Amino acid sequence: MRLLMVSNAEEVRCTLVKVMHDQGHRPPLLANTCREALHHLERPAEVNASIDVLLVDLDPLGDEGPETCRRLRESPRLKDVPLLAMSSLAATQAYELAQSASALDFVRKPIDVPELLGRLHSACEHKCQLDKCRADAGELERLNGELQRLCVIDDLTGIANRRFFNLVVTQEWARAVREVMPFSVIMIDIDFFKDYNDLYGHQQGDACLRKVAGALSAAVRRPGDYVIRYGGEEFLVVLPHTGIRGAQAVAELLRAGVEGLNIEHGRSSVHNRVTISLGVASTLPERSGSLNALIEGADQAIYEAKREGRNQVRAYSGSARYLHAPHSVPCPHRG
């Protein structure tokens, strides 16, 4: 047990020193004033030392007692340390004074040693309980943070899920509206994925989804861009601060990256390897616009890509129209 006592009464100080020595505890830190007490805590030998109980003799402080206690508790080192107020007043008055000083309890003077020890042990027990609660709260906060992280991560692929979209992407859209900055999305669908599952089984289908998600994530590396598993075999790429040309170039990189995985697909009528179709939509957000409308545009574009033969990128411009062939193209600036 380590105590810090603020008192200029020599008799009180000597009694406390003797009690701590007789009980086998470390010598208390003694201070005449609030300033001196805070100075003690700044000494190199005390910087990392724990203070278990703070005792403040209110008698010499008079009306300034509660304010002195408040200043002491403003110290980060003392804000959670139990405070015991010392006073020679009658019990009722001492109790009221202790309350005004936000003390946990009070010790009457002249000091009765058994009473003092009982108050000190109660205060230490209180601090132990607080420390335990704080540790439990910290662990709970960590677990909650981990749980929240898991709630926005797709279990199968390890990328963001629809909950992440609802929590984060909608905020990014609102920011783009405020800043009047371009905003693009890419809707992605694995070509003939049901046929892949039917031929190779669901385990292989899950492995395929993980590989595709990895390829998409590898191609989308700019901070603030997101790859989301939007549905079963659907993915959504969100590109804030990106115009149509940049989004098209990213989409082509994504298409080529998945084709480059060389995952065999024996029932695709497009390719003998797994491929994807992509729909791009871009806008300069306005307050009257909506993120859902932008995604619907990308959805229309992806249907056009499928209708035209799949394994290609299409962009939405009011009515989806073919913008470039399904080959690799240079990736221009994201504007």
Image: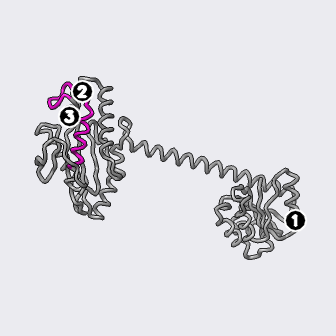
Q: Amino acid at mark 1?
A: Pro
Residue tagged 1: 110
Does residue 273 appear to the left or right of 135 in the view shown? left
| Mark 2 or mark 1: whose residue is earlier in sequence | 1
- Work out whether residue 296 can be spotted: no
Magenta run includes residue 284: no
Task: Please give left or right for residue 221 compared with residue 69 in the image.
Answer: left
Q: Which residues are magenta?
A: 248-272
Report the mark closest to the observer, 2 or 1: 2
- The residue pinned by badge 3 equals 191
Q: Quadrant of residue 89?
A: bottom right
User: Which amino acid does the dot numbered 3 rest on?
Assistant: Asp
Q: Nearer the viewer, mark 3 or mark 2?
A: 2
Give the class, few, some or many, for how many residues have Cα within 10 Å of label 2's Cα (few <14, many ≥20). Answer: some
Q: Position of residue 191 (x, y in %)?
A: 20, 34
Given contact means CB atoms under 8 Å apart, are the residues at marks 3 and 1 in contact? no
Can residue 278 be seen here? The reply is yes
Assign a secondary structure to mark 2: loop
In the image, is residue 235 above or below residue 199? below
Name above or below for residue 147 compared with residue 35. above
Q: Which quarter shows the C terminus?
A: bottom left
Q: Nearer the viewer, mark 3 or mark 1?
A: 3
The answer to whether residue 15 is above or below residue 194 is below
Amino acid at circle 2: Glu
* Gap in angstroms between the C-alphas marked 3 and 2: 12 Å
Check disc 2 and report the residue beneath it.
264
The residue lying at 10 percent from left, 39 percent from top is 308
Disc 3 or 2, which lies upstream in sequence?
3
**Other-residue count near label 3 (Cα within 10 Å), few / some / many at <14 / 14–19 / ≥20:** many
Point out the residue furthest to the bottom here. 63
In the image, residue 52 above or below residue 261 = below
